[in-house]
Amino acid sequence: MANNIVKIGMIQMNVLFSEPDKNIQHASELVKSAKAKGAQICVLPECMDLGWGNPEASSLAEPVPGKVSDAYQKIATENKVFLVAGLTEREQEKIYNTALLISDGGEILYKHRKINVLTGVEDVYAIGDRIGVTETPLGKIGIDICADNSLNSLSIAITLGRMCADMILSPCAWAVKSDYNIETEPYGEEWHIPYGKISKMFGIPVIGVSNVGQVSKGSWSGWKAIGNSIAYDSDGSLITVLPYGESEECVQVIDVHLTDKKVTGTALSEKIENEVCL
């Protein structure tokens, strides 16, 4: 695989709460745009169907497979791209904050349920109980969701790295209070630190894609989702930061570099033991 380049479409879209049909249609248009720019994999935000933290999830969430996942599979198939997309999943009486990895032929390859569910939405989402990586023609892909990559849960991303993921792709929903002032309090350090650490530690790209728009329902109502999506390359260098702001919807296609894993297993733990603080 030495120094293989993969094109990732970062789709920082406006997500409307409780409007799954509108969100899916809009996502389809944006994925088409990313494909036209050369994207091989497209990443959509967290809970892109209903909005993150939406208390109406208990009545609106769909199972997987189901209406929303079927629509995501159609988007992947029509555009011939791999798709990583967040959605709100129902399984019997439980609701999960879920991300799907879908092949360019429309097959659901993997399903990740968020583990680090934030304070304030524990009554909305159940906790995921497993992680994994998936072998694809574009490399071995690890999926997690937003706060799964926080410094306080870095063990999740570290486990994906230990499982020899070639990249970590993360649907996100980064939000701030309505009166947040980026001029006096620059945003993003809480993500740049763990993303940079993981990418450098394991020699893998780490990409997080957030939505934009108003958080209009739930315990975080009144906050605003501000994008600011970020990508780090396999050498620990910052590739891009997408625009910050509740109206800053955009599509950007980036090149990431995948490298051969020269150290694994116990040798890897010896290599990184001094770099990790948990």
Image (cartoon, rainbow, N blue to C red):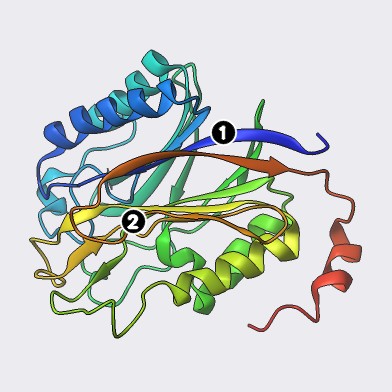
How far is disc 1 from disc 2 in space, using C-alphas?
A: 19 Å
Residue 275 in the image: above or below residue 56 = below
* Percent of width and height locating residue 213: 17, 55
Element under label 1? strand
Three-letter code for the amino acid on which mark 2 is drawn: Pro
Residue 7: numbered disc: 1
Indicate the quadrant containing the C terminus: top left, top right, bottom left or bottom right: bottom right
Element under label 2? loop
The residue at 19%/58% (across/down) is: 246
The residue at 83%/69% (across/down) is: 269
The residue at 68%/48% (across/down) is: 165
Task: Residue 91: tell me if it is visible.
Answer: no
Three-letter code for the amino acid on which mark 1 is drawn: Lys
Q: Quadrant of residue 36?
A: top left
Give neighbour class at mark 1: few <14, some 14-19, many 20+ (Cα, 10 Å). some
* Percent of width and height locating residue 159: 66, 61
Q: Which residue is mark 2?
A: 243
Q: Earlier in the sequence, mark 1 or mark 2?
A: 1
